[in-house]
Image (cartoon, helix red, strand yellow):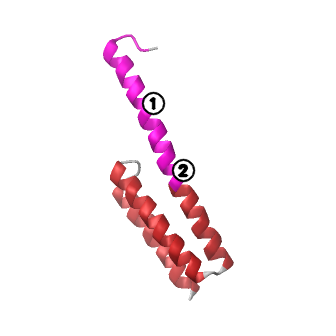
């Protein structure tokens, strides 16, 4: 348990940030699942739309600092390569 006032405040702030990060990552994972389902089914049009949603989710997560910018770019790139292999 935190002893000082500042440590108690940090604990509260960390908990808020943890919940926000969890929400953002959940949104990214859901978007990526939808994309993977479309790619697996071979639906290129649906996959292209889902890719835009996933890219947007990754960009927002990186902007909020939940994941690093390079990691977001790398994952978007790999998803794009998978989409291009469909055709």
Give whichever of discs 2 and 1 has the lower sequence position.
1
Q: Residue at 41% of width from left, 24% of height from top?
A: 11
Residue furthest bottom in the image: 87
Residue for point 57% across, 69% down: 35
Which region of the structure is painted magenta? 2-27
Label 2 residue SS:
helix
Q: Is residue 10 magenta?
A: yes
Count of numbered badges drawn on the protein: 2
Q: Could you tell whether 9 is left or right of 55 in the image?
A: left
Report which quarter residue 73 is drawn in.
bottom left
The residue drawn where x is 68% and y is 77% is: 41
SS for callout 1: helix
Left or right: residue 82 compared with residue 6: right
* Residue ID for mark 1: 15
Q: Which residue is mark 2?
A: 26
Return the residue nearer the eye: 60 or 70: 60
- Label 1 Cα crowd, 10 Å radius (few <14 / some 14-19 / many 20+): few
Q: Position of residue 14 (x, y in %)?
A: 41, 30
């Amino acid at each position: 348990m935190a002893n000082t006032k500042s440590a108690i405040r940090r604990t509260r702030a960390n908990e808020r940030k943890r919940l926000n990060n969890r929400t953002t990552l959940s949104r990214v994972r859901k978007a990526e699942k939808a994309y993977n389902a479309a790619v697996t089914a071979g639906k290129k049009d649906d996959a292209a739309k889902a890719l835009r949603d996933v890219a947007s989710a990754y960009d927002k997560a990186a902007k909020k600092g939940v994941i690093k910018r390079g990691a977001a770019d790398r994952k978007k790139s790999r998803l794009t390569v998978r989409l291009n292999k469909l055709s």
